[in-house]
Amino acid sequence: MISRTFIICMGLTSVVLDLVGTHETPETMRKGYYGAYLSFFHSCGLTFLIPEPILEVLAELGLSLTQLLLNFLRHLVAFLVKAREDGLAFGYVVTMEDHVVASRNDKEIESIGFEIKRLSKELEATKREGKKDAENIEALTEDWRRVHLENETLTSQMVAQRARIAALEVERHRDIRRASRIARRDIAAKYREVLEFLNDRWASKKKEVSAEIRLQEVTANIDLLNELKDGGLTVDAELARLKGMEGDCEDLVALAVVPDWSISELDLPQVSDDSVDQVGGSSVPDDSVSS
């Protein structure tokens, strides 16, 4: 009983005690409190009021004052007095204080739990958003890599096209030079053919003129001889007339002098690269050009 009382007095009880009111008398005592009156304490040598801790202990033990031995009551009172002198707190007040503190701690713990849950939810949401952002970043990185590869491919194609264009330009200029040389050669050949044809015509014309002149000379000589035979022409007069005709012929010959008919002495039109380019600028094989 003493050990059980010690456990109770250390504040481990959770009993709620309904004390007797000051207006109640021994005749109107409720059941369980019929022995709680001053004469009982007086018979035990106690002159103070019933302490609340004693009533709390009795309520926890399920005892009434009339069920207590005098020695147990004295030990219980001495125990309570010693505890008070040592500054120990126990009983209902301490239990309620502990309960309030525990309740407050429970509320704080519950509040902390709610805060932890809220932070956990926010953390999960942040993780989900971070995962989405990471996926978006990965997708954007993949798109950037694809665009970078496409750009490199296009750059390589552009460089190849530029090299091809440069090669075509070189080939075009080479073809133009070849065509220019061939065109000049063809034109020179045509001029040569024309000159040779004209030269042949001119030689034939000169032969014709020479024959006509000889014919005229023969005719004139025949006429002259006939006139001399008939005596109608004197030698001096005819000589003077022939000298006059000689001077006129020399003047006509000087006016009819023909320059050199060679190609180097002719003022022929020149064939430029631009004129050949305008005509067509087609490619000509190397083997078609004679050295």
Image (spheres, rainbow, N blue to C red):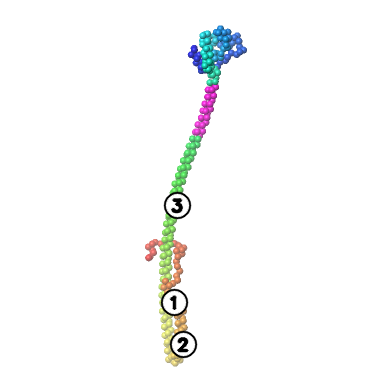
Task: Give the CA separation, mark 1 to mark 2.
Answer: 28 Å
- For residue 282, say whether it is visible: no
Q: Is residue 30 left or right of residue 194?
A: right
Task: Give the labeled residue for mark 1.
Answer: 258
Q: Magenta region: which residues?
A: 99-125
Q: Where is residue 140 shown, x and y percent of the image? A: 47, 42
Task: Give the CA separation, mark 3 to mark 2.
Answer: 92 Å
Q: Amino acid at mark 1?
A: Val
Residue at the extreme top of the image, as rendered: 43
Magenta segment includes 95: no
Mark 2 surroundings within 10 Å by alpha-carbon count, few (fewer than 14), some (14 through 19), many (20 or more):
few
Q: Which quadrant would residue 172 be assigned to in this image? A: bottom left
Q: Relative to 226, is 129 above or below?
A: above
Task: Give the labeled residue for mark 3.
Answer: 158
Task: Give the main secondary structure of the magenta stretch.
Answer: helix
Tell me the residue at 54%/10% (across/down). Answer: 65
Residue at the extreme front of the image, as rendered: 85
Q: Relative to 193, is 56 above or below?
A: above
Tell me the residue at 51%/28% (across/down). Answer: 113
Q: Where is residue 18 shown, x and y percent of the image? A: 57, 15
Q: What secondary structure is marked by label 2?
A: helix
Q: What secondary structure is marked by label 1?
A: loop
> In the drawing, what numbered circle is on residue 7?
none
Q: How many marks?
A: 3
